[in-house]
Amino acid sequence: MDQIIADCNTGTTVIERRAKLFRGFADPSRLAIMDALREAPLAVHEIVTRTELSQPNVSNHLRCLLDCGLVASDRDGRFIRYRISNPRITALLNDVDALLELVAEGVEACDNYREA
């Protein structure tokens, strides 16, 4: 029952917040960026190289990830290095990989969430 009761401060239910969090992870470009950042903090040009995404695409998604608190940034000389903001996010991504080893066949077969 607690999951559907709205938080008094935000008016958002736990379920709605979970859905919003997972929407943050739902984009392949954002997942590629997060995957690159699991290894080490990176500057935009390093993320572009590792993900093969365009620089504008990386910058746009980093802004989204920053706004949502999933990544953080630190100045390193003339560069800004981006990193996963909390070790629990890395643990979640690792858990997702482990779960996919168990359910990958079903996920691949699912027609409900195919990209258009």
Image (tube, rainbow, N blue to C red):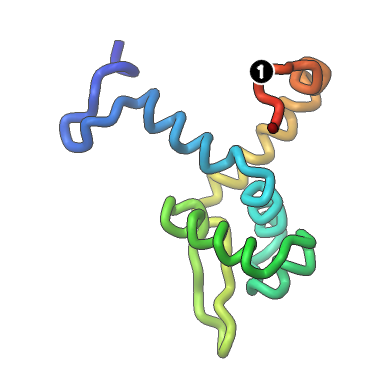
The x and y percentages for residue 88 are 53, 44
Farthest residue to the bottom: give it. Answer: 77
The answer to whether residue 7 is left or right of residue 18 is left
Total marks in image:
1
Eyeballing the image, is 113 above or below 95? above
The amino acid marked with disc number 1 is Asn
Farthest residue to the front: give it. Answer: 116
Foreground of the two, 52 or 70: 52
The x and y percentages for residue 45 are 70, 75
The x and y percentages for residue 116 are 69, 32
The x and y percentages for residue 102 are 78, 20
Q: Residue at x 64, y 72 (%)?
A: 44
* Secondary structure of residue under mark 1: loop
Residue highlighted by disc 1: 112
Farthest residue to the left: give it. Answer: 8
The answer to whether residue 1 is left or right of residue 102 is left
Eyeballing the image, is 14 above or below 76? above
Foreground of the two, 39 or 111: 111
Q: Residue at x 56, y 83 (%)?
A: 76
Task: Name the image quarter holding residue 8.
Answer: top left
Are there few (<14), some (14-19), or many (20+) residues within 10 Å of tag 1?
A: few
Task: Name the image quarter holding residue 55.
Answer: bottom right
The answer to whether residue 103 is left or right of residue 9 is right
Quarter of the image with the N terminus is top left
Farthest residue to the right: give it. Answer: 105
Q: Residue at x 28, y 30 (%)?
A: 12
Q: Residue at x 44, y 35 (%)?
A: 20
